[in-house]
Image (cartoon, helix red, strand yellow):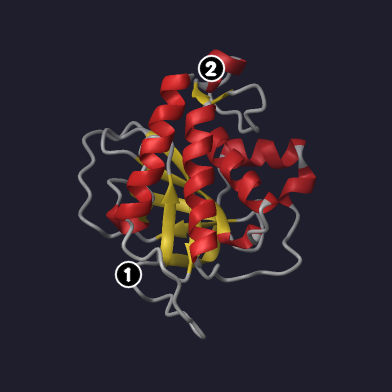
Amino acid sequence: MANRYAVFASVLLCCAAAFGFAMPVSAQSIDFTNAAFVPVSSRGTSIPIGAYDFCSRLPGECKPFAKVKQAEILTQEKWTELLWVNASVNARIIPMSDMDLYGVEEFWTYPNDGYGDCDDIALEKRRELIQLGWAPSTLLMTVVRQANGEGHAVLMVRTDRGDLILDNLEGEIRVWNQTPYRFLKRQSQASLAKWVDIWDDRNVVITASTAQ
C-alpha cells in the first residue's frame, strides 16, 4: 500500500506540472465545437448493460438532473480537486474484474470494499467529485475501445478547457483527443440513465475488434 501511495504522490506532482491549461481563465461563453470537446449525436443511443443494471438497482443515482450545467470553469481549486480525486482513487482501488469479484461479465457498482474494475473506479471518481460540489451533469461515464480492441470505461469531465479524461490505466489527466482510445458513447448531460453516441473520426489504430 505504501508503494501505491508513493506512486499516487508522484503522479499528482507530474500532472500538476504537465497539464498546460491548469490556470483559470474567464469564460463567458464556451465554443463546444472546438476539437477539445467530443462531438456527440443529438439523439439518444442504447445504454450499456452495466449502466442499465446499475440504474435499475440504484434508481436514485439515475434521476434526471434538476439543473444541467454545461461545463465547469476550471479554476486552480477545481484543477487541484480533479488531480487529487483521480490520483487518490487510482491509488486506493485495486483493479479486479467483475468476473473475479461477482462472477458476471458486467456489474457496475461503487468499489466500497477497495476492489473494482474500470467502470467501478470511474463511478467512484464521479461520486467523490459530486461530494466536492461538482455538477453531476459535467461528470460523464464514457465507454471507449482500447488499442487492443478491448472495451474500457473512463470518466469524462466537461470543463471550459475541454473534455478531460480520468482513467485508471493512465495517471495523467488528458483532453479526450490526446488519449489512445476510440470513443464510442457517453452518458447524456441530462441523466446517467440516458446515453449518446460519440462521433470519433480520429485516426486511432485498433488492433482487434473484440470489444462489445
Give x and y (percent) for residue 20. 31, 62
Q: Is residue 132 above or below residue 161?
A: above
> Looking at the image, which residue is at 49% across and 84% down?
29
Residue visible at 50% across and 20% down? 96
Q: At which x and y percent is residue 67?
A: 72, 69
Q: What's the distance in space between the residues labelled 1 and 2, CA to CA? A: 37 Å
- Residue 97 at x, y percent in the picture: 50, 21
- Res 99 label: 2
In the drawing, does residue 2 fall left or right of residue 51?
A: left
Which mark identifies residue 202?
none
Q: How many marks?
A: 2
Q: What kind of element bears circle 2?
A: helix
Tell me the kind of residue under disc 2: Met
Using the image, determine if residue 139 lies above or below residue 48: below
Secondary structure of the residue carrying numbered label 1:
loop
Q: Is residue 76 above or below residue 187?
A: below
Q: Residues within 10 Å of mark 1 (few under 14, many from 20)?
A: few
